[in-house]
Amino acid sequence: MSGSPSGRGWRLGAVLAALVALACVVTLAVRVVTAPADVEGDGLAALRPATSPSASPATSPTTGPAPTPSLRATARAADLESARSGDRAAPPVRLRIPDLGVAADVRPVGVQDDGAMVIPAAPTSVGWYRYGAAPATPEGHTVIAGHVATREDGPGALAPLAGAREGMRVEVTDADGVEHTYEVTGRESVRKKALPVDEIFARDGAPRLVLITCGGEYLPELRAHRDNVVVTAAPVG
């Protein structure tokens, strides 16, 4: 039997309300992933005192048609061959940020022919720039980067970086089983074309951990986010 008009109207209203609520949840989720991270703590200024004029030059970042534009690193072959500081210390193999629920395997990566840092394709893994510092290296920046998300696999391990707060603990385990603890000193969202690569990839100065992923507005024509979210952390102890 068909229900009364008032009953059918109530059910239709309930369905519409549920659809509106679902749309709001989806919209909120998209905004959480893509919203600019602004500045927390010292932001990228945490890297500047640790960078000397002799830091390795690097090319400017560019955007391209890939799902997430490559992070630009040093492009000079001679520099790469002479900068194997990571070869003298155990590489990082595991990254954890307990307060953000981040837990990811870390893989050593290099650079492409055009000087772009290689980023692991699987968003559940992150890449450590093996031509820079390792966690036990006494100076320079340990750079770890990963995708915020991919169309095939969804959110990446570093998607929560936009929520990093000053004072949060970061744990990096190296291949020798040693756990290195850091404390977040800053977080900043910066346009990819303005990314200060000289400061990020510095091989001298005070030891720092630098974590990078994508963020900001998603640009469909480039299939990429407009910004990078950069988190800096200092060793504890």
Image (tube, rainbow, N blue to C red):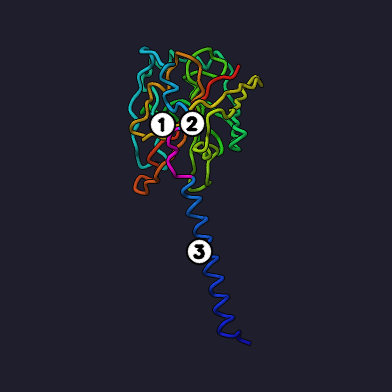
Mark sitting earlier along the chain (1/3): 3
Q: Is residue 182 left or right of residue 187?
A: right
**Type of the residue with mark 1:** Leu
User: Dot 2 corresponds to which residue?
Assistant: 145
Would you identify the image quadrant in which residue 99 lies?
A: top right
Q: Position of residue 117 (x, y in %)?
A: 43, 29
Residue 65: x percent and y percent? 36, 42
Q: Are marks 1 and 3 in contact (CB under 8 Å)?
A: no
Judged from the image, the secondary structure of the residue bearing numbered disc 2 is strand
Which one is closest to the eye, mark 1 or mark 3? 3
Residue kind at label 3, given as amino acid type = Val
| Mark 1 touches mark 2? (CB < 8 Å) | yes
Residue at the image point whose x is 39% and y is 34% from the top: 190
Marked residue nearer the N-terminal end (2 or 3): 3
3D distance between C-alphas at marks 1 and 3: 38 Å
Is the residue under label 3 in contact with that under label 2 (CB below 8 Å)? no
Label 1, residues with CA under 10 Å away: few <14, some 14-19, many ≥20: many
Q: Magenta part of the protein: which range?
A: 33-39
Looking at the picture, which amino acid does disc 2 mark? Ala
Position of residue 189 measured from the top left corner of the image (x, y, whole percent): 42, 35
Q: Secondary structure at mark 3?
A: helix
Q: Which residue is mark 1?
A: 71
Assign the C terminus to one quadrant of the image.
top right
Category of crowding for the residue at label 3, using alpha-carbon neighbours closer than 10 angstroms: few (below 14), some (14–19), many (at least 20): few
The answer to whether residue 231 is seen in the rendering is yes
Looking at the image, is mark 1 or mark 2 earlier in the sequence? 1
Q: Which mark is residue 20?
A: 3
Does the rendering let one see residue 122? no
Residue 35 shown in magenta: yes
